[in-house]
Amino acid sequence: MNYPTISLDVWKQVGEGGNGATYINAKEPDVLLKVSRLADGTEQAMSKEFFASRAVYELGIPTPEMKQLVKVGEDFGIICQLIKGKVSFARLSNQEPERIDERAAQMAQLTRQLHTTVVPASPYLPSMKELMLEALAQTQMLGGKKLQQVTEFVQSLPDADTLLHGDLQMGNLIMSDNRPYWIDLGRASHGIPMFDLGHFYLFCNIFSKKQRVQDIAHMTDKQMVQFWKSFAVAYAGEGNLDAFEAECKRFAALDVVLLGHIQTLNWHERLFLGLLAKSLFK
């Protein structure tokens, strides 16, 4: 596919994340350029994010409108609607730590709303259950009885048409003029909400110990753990919080396997993630 080619000469970098950077252009004040810096699969990754985000937008979920896929040198990018004056829940939590519990409860409410959205059949919002089974069929992180146990668990899960963010965490929820928006929907899909919650548990309670994650989230590990605890209480309601967290851990193990499937990792990272998946799934 041929993409319009643009130069960064007239663009100013305004942000950076784990997989790329964002830019603005004074001549085009209403759009944002997001450039992927993934080691491989950049075209596929950005195309998936573009069409998945557009599908979510068309469902009426507040998220920036996708405009165009572009080529930037050897990289690929997306031009989308610029949400002016935005600030993420992560930065808000770091700037006002006394309001972490309040922000977490607000995010829990918005996540519940997300998880009540029905996804019609769409090639851009695939089944997370099917994606997980595909990852398990190819993983080298698990083997033998453990792999069989985890695979049978996923096979037993109900099919669901619930919208999933796919990368649920406080950095992917932003505010502008007191209005929330979901961003970074490249892994959006459908399935039972626990897939999202397991990913969020993993991010806040385990990956939060890594300095790189803290830098990306603009939060300390203690702030992320506190955010999770308050989020879990608000999301789970009056239910058994211990049972809720135990189930989140099982799905966190699944997310580890999926992460190893969709990203290029060195053997140290694969070893760590494999051990982590085994320890989380009891």
Image (cartoon, rainbow, N blue to C red):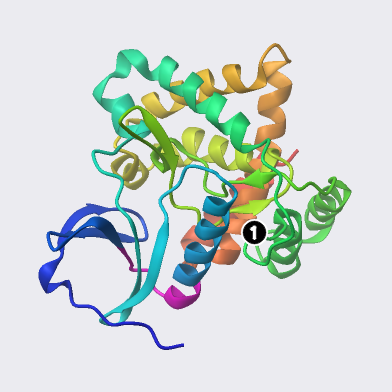
Nearest the eye: 274 or 66:
66
Whole-percent x and y of residue 24? Answer: 19, 58
Q: Amino acid at mark 1?
A: Leu
For label 1, the crowd category at 10 Å Cα-Cα, with few meaning under 14, some 14 to 19 and many 20 or more, is many
Provide the residue span drawn in magenta. 34-44
**Residue 87 vertical placement versus 253 (above, below):** above
**Residue 81 vertical placement versus 222 (above, below):** below
Identify the residue at the far bottom of this view: 2
Q: Going 44% across and 52% down the picture, which residue do you hit?
A: 184
Residue 279 seen anywhere in this rendered image of the structure: no
Indicate the secondary structure of the residue bearing disc 1.
loop
Horizontal arrangement in the rendering, residue 28 relative to residue 201 (left or right)? left
Q: Going 88% across and 48% down the picture, which residue do you hit?
A: 156
Q: Going 48% across and 42% down the picture, which residue do you hit?
A: 62
The answer to if 215 sits in the magenta stretch is: no
Residue 229 seen anywhere in this rendered image of the structure: yes
Horizontal arrangement in the rendering, residue 247 relative to residue 224 (left or right)? right
Nearest the eye: 192 or 113:
113
**Residue 127 vertical placement versus 95 (above, below):** below
Q: Quadrant of residue 37?
A: bottom left
**Residue 162 vertical placement versus 80 (above, below):** above
Q: Going 37% across and 60% down the picture, which residue do you hit?
A: 19
Whole-percent x and y of residue 205? Answer: 50, 33
Whole-percent x and y of residue 254? Answer: 67, 49
Number of labels in the image equals: 1
Nearest the eye: 219 or 49:
49
Horizontal arrangement in the rendering, residue 47 relative to residue 15 (left or right)? right
Quarter of the C terminus within the rendering = top right
Report which residue position mark 1 lands on. 125
The answer to if 37 sits in the magenta stretch is: yes
Whole-percent x and y of residue 23? Answer: 22, 59
